[in-house]
Image (spheres, helix red, strand yellow):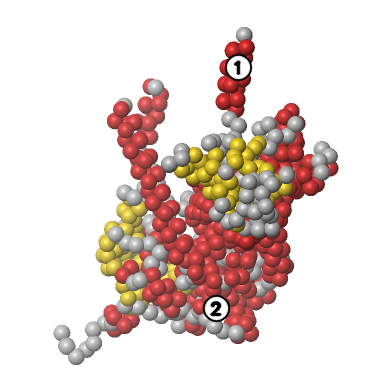
Amino acid sequence: MNMDTPINTSAQPNDILIEIRNLHFSRGDRPIFDGIDMDISRGQITAIMGPSGTGKTTLLKLIGGQLKPDAGTIKVDGEDVHKLSHKALYDLRRRMMGMLFQSGALLTDLSVYDNVAFPLREHTHLSESMIHHLVLLKLQAVGLRGARNLMPAELSGGMARRVALARAIALDPQMIMYDEPFTGQDPISMGVLVTLIRSLNEALGLSSIVVSHDVPETCSISDYVYLISAGKVVEHGSPAQLAKSESAWVQQFMGGLADGPVPFHFKGPSIMDDLMQSGLG
Amino acid sequence: MLLDFLQQLGHRSLSIFARLGRASQFLLVTLMALPSVVMRPFLLVKQMYNTGVQTLLIILVAGIFVGMVLALQAYIVLVDFGAEESISLMVSLSILRELGPVFTGLLFAGRAGSALTAEIGLMKSTEQLSGMEMMAVDPMKYIIAPRFLAGVISVPLLALIFMAVAVLGGFFVATDMLGQYEGVFWSQMQVKVDFYDDVVNSIIKSAVFGFVVVWIAVFEGYDCVPTSEGLGQATTRSVVYSSLAVLGLDFVLTAVMYAV
Amino acid sequence: MSTRNIEILVGLFVAGALAALFMLAMKVSNFTSYGETDGGYEIRARFDNVGGLKVRSPVSAGGVRVGKVTNISYNNESFEAVVTMNIESKYKFPKDTSAGILTAGLLGEQYVGLEPGGDEENLAAGDMIELTQSALVLEQVIGQFLYSKAQDK
């Protein structure tokens, strides 16, 4: 091997924003993650997909430092999230992270405008007129400048998510974590969100992590995909690579097939035995 | 069978102790977050409105009626001994020593405590608390501490208002309905009601009740299972536990304050 | 509701509570009488039995409240109770004033009643009242009554 050629540039430590090594996490006796390794690159949209209940949201909470792993490390921008003090963790979140929750998580007693202004008022000493400008710009970016005086209860689900997105980018974070952004959306809001995630990522130079099980939408915007199931990373690669995967499980998941390695029937005795037994009983 | 029972017992006591531990830890973190309320006084004012002002109406109505009923009952008992001039004494001592703080504590638990639990529980289940954490705003400082402080301040204020209104209610019945002289009403009371023993102690009592009721209410909300069922259970628990705590603590405090 | 209205209502709430405290202090309790005792003087009296007398029980003369009991102790040499009273300085009593423990009404509270004598000199701070009448103890009274009834027969 020629020593002069640089090894694969995407593996340069500087390009890795989040580095997850040997992550173990369990809820009670139930293991959620059983040794996960992941590298999430800067400036890309990384999707984490898997069946419901595989702890995708839990993974985001682990990255955000809201949960502590049983073993393993998560480094964000070179800092081990779970070794930071309370203050340093809050600093890291303010500097680096924005998160879009499934429900939007808007503060119900504040208007749309105040919700977007909230992080600015809490973390900066900007004047009200400055904040006013910033809020309108952020709302303009998600197309909801006209809705600034509405209360969260008056918004539809898709609009709430867009307001939450405007709030998440208010402090210009380096990364945004999307928790199930497409779930329960009508096709139009779905299309809006897909476009927004892609365009924001490019316009703001963000790194995005999208957790989802909506395969076609997620694949259409992501640069790299991790598939997790039963606490392990089953497959990773670009959407095109995954589509060509030879694993039957990956094919079933990506194609949305009803039966395959994951059986259609929940495990139990065969129907013959069940019927016979109830017949005798 | 016996082993099963023992295991159940062990399991339950362990989970009760775990909850107590979480509640104490929660209280500690809340108390440490209190200084930050000074930085955001508008949050405290807003919560004083939500807990204090919103509870005021029920406190006023209850206070008037409790005072009036006490005066009537006192008259019925005392008139047999020819001691009806002591109505005011009986009314004021019962209200200051027991009924004022206890009633306020119970009404506050039912009106404001349950609302606090439900509000915080709902914030938890709609991920508002998590969302705040991810925006690097500590919900202990922004949500919990102002509500806690507002409650602890509001309850003694409400108790004072309750007691004053109840005495006025008694005054109304004694003078207008039973024909007692105004001067007799007030002077009889002043002879035996002591400012420190009765008024100050009742303020201390109500402050303790406020502390405990708000602690339980806020903790139950923060610790609830974030589903609609869990939220309902947490609200019920909040009212039941805080009411029992008020009554139990009242006995302890009375024993400490007035027992010879 | 606007922030201003909320602030006004909270302000009213706090003001109402302060007004309530003021009323409880001035109208309902004896707070006003705390200040008056500052300039008073102390006298003492010995009693065989103080009955239900307590610290802060009133001291009165001719039906007028003139002071209050500040201390009740037991003398180990004379085997008597010693009651210390604070009398407001504007009230004067002769040296041979007598003190008794009386009851307001049949079941009312007990108080110290002062009965002025005819001496030229007045009681000064720290003086001891010599003539005293102990509290009536109901059991003793009933006991004496039954005893005398039994003797009559």
State the residue in front, B33 or B206. B206
Residue with the most extreme bottom position: A4
Helix, strand or loop at label 1? It is: helix
The image quarter containing residue A26 is: bottom left
Tell me what residue is drawn at x 54 percent, y 73 percent.
B39
Residue B212 in percent (x, y) is at 51, 51
Q: Is residue B143 above or below residue B76?
A: below
State the residue in front, C5 or A47. C5
Residue A62 in percent (x, y) is at 37, 64
Tell me what residue is drawn at x 58 percent, y 17 percent.
C147
Q: Is residue C27 above or below residue C51?
A: below
Q: Quadrant of the C terminus of chain A?
A: top left
State the residue in front, C67 or C133. C133
On whether disc 1 and disc 2 are found on a single subunit, the reply is no
Q: Nearer the viewer, mark 1 or mark 2?
A: 1
Tell me what residue is drawn at x 48 percent, y 64 percent.
B140
The subunit letter for the residue under badge 2 reads: A
Helix, strand or loop at label 2? It is: helix
Q: Is residue C33 left or right of residue A209?
A: right
Q: Quadrant of the N terminus of chain A?
A: bottom left
Q: Amino acid at mark 2?
A: Leu
The image quarter containing residue A141 is: bottom right
Q: Is residue A275 above or below residue B185?
A: above
Badge number at residue C148: 1
Badge number at residue A120: 2
State the residue in front, A220 or C103. C103
Q: Amino acid at mark 1?
A: Ser
Tell me what residue is drawn at x 62 percent, y 58 percent.
C40
